[in-house]
Amino acid sequence: MKGARGCRMMLVTRPDYDPGTKYLSSWSQILIEEARAKGIEVLDLPGTKATKSEFEGRLKKKQPSLVVLNGHGNEDCVTGQEGKPLVESKVNAEILSSSVTYAVSCQSAARLGREVGGYLNTAYIGYEKKFSILHSHGYFKRPSEDPLAKPFMDFSNHIVRSLLKGHTVEESVRRAKEVGETHLRSLETSLSDPDIQMAAAFLSRDISCLVAHGDTVKCIIY
């Protein structure tokens, strides 16, 4: 895609058809509210709007500088509602060129992220391995209040918060990892609890497999 992307706009996909995507959708709503409070235009694709046609249409028309993809994925793609692909390696990866993309998705940084990061003036932040969130019983209808999910989502959301403050891709990843490490140290004080022990192990893996490809000195606010 050619042309400069808007510096005060982000697009967010929020499928919500299973527990994992419902949690990501709910916690992304917090970021949407924070962004709008800063005067940043948000293109929100919740639930059944998180489809390939809606996604491609908004990207081509609006050209947002930040794209946040929530959903399941693998090394070659990130999906939307009902697990249907939104962006795939060797299919439509070029649609993310000139933007900063953050994919809250398993494994997509392994191949898709490298391909996207190869485009000029483009960056891709994501996970080379599985991305995990633990959640507690009784919070399915109010995921953003779940204390077990909070360390994972504070860590993940901090990437977007940092980018929206004008930090570079590289700085935003570093700052998010610092937030994650702070939560990890707190969890490690209660490892006698099996749930906390598992949360610490999963959070540690999330932190270690978060990477950025492409133009890592890129900012979305300039």
Image (cartoon, rainbow, N blue to C red):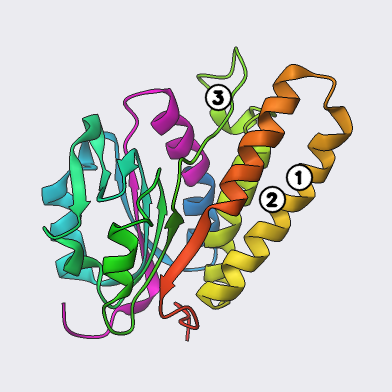
| Side of 136 where 88 appears, left or right | left
**Which residue in the structure is indicated by mark 1?**
183
State the CA–CA distance, disc 1 to disc 3. Answer: 21 Å
Residue 128 in the image: state x and y as whole percent: 44, 52
- 3D distance between C-alphas at marks 2 and 3: 22 Å
Which mark sits nearer the N-terminus, 2 or 3?
A: 3
Q: Amino acid at mark 3?
A: Arg
Report how far apart the C-alphas of labels 2 and 1 lie in the structure: 5 Å
Label 1 residue SS: helix
Report the quarter where the N terminus lies. bottom left
On the image, numbered disc 2 is attached to which residue? 180
Residue 66, above or below 158: below
Judge left or right: residue 86 versus residue 135.
left
The residue that mark 3 highlights is: 142
Q: Residue 78 versus residue 29: which sits nearer the camera?
A: 78
Task: Identify the element where label 3 is drawn.
Answer: loop
- Quarter where residue 139 is shown: top right
* Label 2 residue SS: helix
Amino acid carrying label 1: it is His
Residue 78 part of the magenta segment: no
Which residue is at the front of the view, 165 or 107?
Answer: 107
